[in-house]
Image (tube, helix red, strand yellow):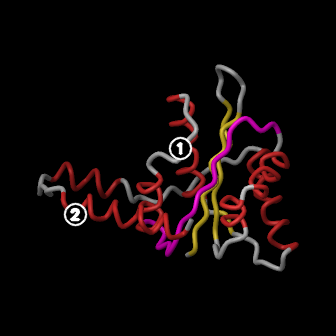
């Protein structure tokens, strides 16, 4: 999974470097705005409980607890909103999210778990732990995390995006 992430990041870097750059100030300003650190994020009870369960699981294995970063939760929320708006469950634009977190927070590595339609924090954690790739992120060599759990107002189903980073 880490090798696949490295391949995706490398491919993204190659694609970005092959696109011609412009010196237009408006493009420069929008690029700078994309790396602005989000400081405030309001956590709901599901998000806080899920983060606590993840950290309790890590602690039970002798792993360090992860520190939460509001900026990563904001990026997670953006992805939840994207999935709700487009009625999809996917990792689209993960490379852009991870690059933003690397630039903004100085992260060395980034991982992501998503989920859909779990009614409780324990249910989503159990599902992630039953999946080798998701478990690897939860138990991985990360130091920080962010999470967003948003409900689709049309059907009441929950969308989960959980981002991990080593900083």
Q: Nearer the viewer, residue 54 or 71?
A: 54
Crowding around mark 2 (Cα neighbors within 10 Å: few <14, some 14 to 19, many 20+) is: few
What residue sits right under mark 2 in the picture?
17
Q: Eyeballing the image, is 140 above or below 100?
A: below
Crowding around mark 1 (Cα neighbors within 10 Å: few <14, some 14 to 19, many 20+) is: many
Q: Where residue 48 sits in the image (x, y, percent)? A: 77, 52
Which quadrant: the N terminus?
bottom right
109 drawn magenta = yes
Q: Where residue 25 sits in the image (x, y, percent)? A: 16, 53
User: On residue 79, which mark appears?
Assistant: 1
103 drawn magenta = no
Separation of marks 1 and 2 at Cα, in angstroms = 25 Å
User: What secondary structure is found at the residue carrying circle 2?
Assistant: helix
Residue depicted at 78% across the width and 61% down the height: 54
User: Does residue 154 appear left or right of residue 37 in this picture?
Assistant: right
Magenta stretch, residue numbers = 104-119
């Amino acid at each position: 999974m880490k090798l696949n992430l490295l391949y995706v990041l490398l491919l993204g870097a190659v694609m970005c470097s092959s696109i011609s750059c412009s010196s237009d100030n408006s493009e420069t300003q929008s690029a700078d705005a994309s790396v602005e650190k989000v400081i405030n994020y309001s956590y709901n009870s599901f998000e806080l409980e899920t983060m606590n369960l993840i950290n309790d699981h890590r602690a039970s294995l002798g792993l360090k607890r992860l520190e939460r970063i509001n900026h990563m939760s904001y990026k997670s929320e953006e992805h939840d909103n994207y999935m709700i708006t487009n009625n999809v469950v996917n990792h689209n634009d993960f490379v852009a999210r991870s690059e933003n977190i690397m630039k903004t927070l100085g992260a060395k590595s980034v991982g992501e778990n998503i989920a859909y339609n779990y009614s409780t924090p324990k249910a989503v954690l159990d599902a992630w732990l039953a999946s080798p790739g998701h478990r690897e992120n939860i138990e991985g060599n990360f130091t920080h995390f962010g999470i967003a759990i948003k409900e689709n107002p049309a059907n009441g189903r929950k969308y989960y995006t959980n981002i991990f980073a080593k900083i």
